[in-house]
Image (cartoon, grey):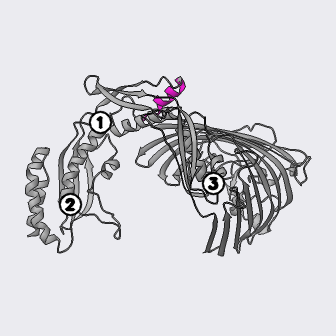
Amino acid sequence: MRETWFQLWHGLWTGHSAMAVARSRFSVLLLLVALFAGACREQGDIKIHSLDFQGVKQVNKKALADALQTKRGSKIPWGHKTYFDRRAFEADLERIQAFYRDRGFPDARVASFDVKLNDTQDQVDVTVRISEGQPTIVSAIDLTGFDVLKPGEQRSLRDSLPLQVDKPLDRPLALASRERALNALRDQGFPYADVAFSQQGAGGNKVKVAFSATPGTLAHFGPIKIDGEKSVGENIVRRQLTYKEGDLFSRKEMRESQRKLYNLELFQFANIESQEDKALQAAEVPTQVTVAEGKHRRLTTGIGYGSEEKARATLRWDHLNFLGNARHAGVEMKWSSLDRGLRLDYTEPYFLSSHMSLNFEGRAWQAVEPVYSQNSLGGRATLRHQANLQTYWAFSLINEFQRSSITNAGLEDFTIRNNLIALGLDPRTGRTRGTTAAVAFDVNRNTTNNLLDANQGYVLTTHVEQAGKWLWGTYNYWEVGGEARQYTRVARSFVWANRLHASTIDALGADSSVPFFKRYFLGGATSIRGWGRFEVSPLSGFGLPIGGLSMFEGSTEIRKPLFGKLGAVGFFDFGQVSMDSMRLPTNLVYAAGPGFRYLTPVGPARIDFGYQLNRIPNLRVNGNPEGRHWRIHFSIGQAF
């Protein structure tokens, strides 16, 4: 009997090339399903084993699947299962056409569909064949009424619109473009602005699109009302605001102020709303700041066990409003058989002005392994000036004592050499003892649009550090370095990323005036990817990397989304380390290769395959002559 039902099912659901034919038989099929369901439901509903789309070429297939109620169940035995619902599937046929219409395909239709039962008739495979048709193409985009913006701001707005010329008339992108145009006006003092969207035929399947703005009255911020604060003073909330009464109205400043309130970690809720009256269009706009305080004292504990560390325990205490005024104090303790110590930190968030903060850090730490030991004691004080969201400078005073030793067995085990270097231990002599007393100055400007995965903007950093000389301490050196990164969109779907980094240390005296942990090494997942970590540097007489005093490196990378969350890159890296101070390295090494990226909530997960375009003569890896001219790197986050 079941074989007969399957034959009827298969005959009705396959072989129909037109939507009209399929619909004419759909009611008959539903009757069969209803009759068949009685037998099936004795053993459970019909599970959806697979859902496949054919003919989908110009829209995102995953986005299409997410818009439907009919979904494929999990392939994992204990995963979520989904069941075939005839009413939901019938509605999904309409949703498919609506989905395509919204994305600029007015002639798209479901050409046919196929539903196949398995032999046991408890699972079904669903196939939908779609004829996409010709899309409606945007031939031009006109912006009118935006003359209140500067020419550069108008160009930036046009380039940033999600809806673009020579692309399908995607309605969600059109709405997003209208919202972006509105924000451009509201960020420049026009809270009452309105933007209308219209389209006009341009012949064939092309249309002209227009965004017409009515800016309204130019306005400034009016009175600021603050509610919800209890133990945190109103002055703490007010000083986090990046605007004040009388400033030009800007939604951007409201968003930045809200971000700064959350960054204090004092509030579990912070919201800033403007109270403009569109009918009145007053020249002053009041704002309402509403906060809800969270817990200011936090105790975090952790215990665990590892094959190397054995038992381990951590304890951290934070007070986010220590002695009031949003001061932050923290204490962290850790103990294991290999690693133990104490860390203290204290931050004065408002030091002399709202742009300045003062931070103190101190630690006493001990690391003990069978082949090495390391003891460090000291800390640093940092004065930071945050001019705006993009730019800051910091001045630091550093005082750190370090004592370490490596056993002869550790020095002879070349497989752990990179780990020793990463810890700052000197594998040349096996012993380190000294105090670093230094002052450092850093400047950073970051205009990128995403900290984890930038696709436009640039980053500029500069670092200057001086130890010894007029300061106490064992070491005596100058260090100067800088880095530039730049990200550019190319042809909409490509990102071209570039980086240059150079730095040098001038030993004011003997070579021992520079501590080993300050020496430069290149190579690895975020450097010249044809080599492993610390493998690019001057070599000892035995071919082992020993670090240098000047370095130069660069990278260029093309990034391209493929489908869904998966992307690909092609990269070219170069650089070298020189043994001497103030000397540009020569004999650069080069590496190139492909890579893949998969977007995760914590940044892109990546795999890179780097191939050496030239060699480092006499290099030894793990004590043996290098026999492999390529490296594979796995990591989270972009290489730069």
- Name the spot of residue 255 as percent of width and height, x first: 54, 44
Q: Which residue is mark 1?
A: 104
Screen quadrant of the N terminus? bottom left
**Amino acid bearing label 3:** Leu
In depth, the one of 61 and 578 nearer the eye is 61
Q: Which residue is mark 3?
A: 264
Q: Residue at x 23, y 51 (%)?
A: 92
- Name the spot of residue 581 as percent of width and height, x first: 82, 41
The residues bearing labels 1 and 2 have C-alpha atoms spaced at a distance of 29 Å
Determine if the magenta segment contains residue 157: yes
Q: Is residue 629 visible?
A: no
**Amino acid bearing label 2:** Asp
Q: Which residue is mark 2?
A: 85
- The disc placed on residue 42 is none
Q: Main secondary structure of the magenta part?
A: helix
Provide the secondary structure element on which disc 1 rests: loop
The residues bearing labels 3 and 1 have C-alpha atoms spaced at a distance of 45 Å
Q: Which residues are magenta?
A: 151-162
**Amino acid bearing label 1:** Gly
Question: Dot 2, how many residues are within 10 Å of its Cα: few (below 14), some (14-19), or many (20+)?
Answer: some
Q: Is residue 50 above or below residue 467?
A: below
In depth, the one of 368 and 233 nearer the eye is 233
The reply to whether discs 1 and 2 touch (Cβ–Cβ < 8 Å) is no
Q: Earlier in the sequence, mark 3 or mark 2?
A: 2
Determine if the magenta segment contains residue 41: no
- Name the spot of residue 490 as percent of width and height, x first: 49, 33
Provide the secondary structure element on which disc 2 rests: loop
Q: Residue at x 18, y 51 (%)?
A: 113
Q: Residue at x 29, y 36 (%)?
A: 104
Report whether 444 appears left or right of 222.
Answer: right
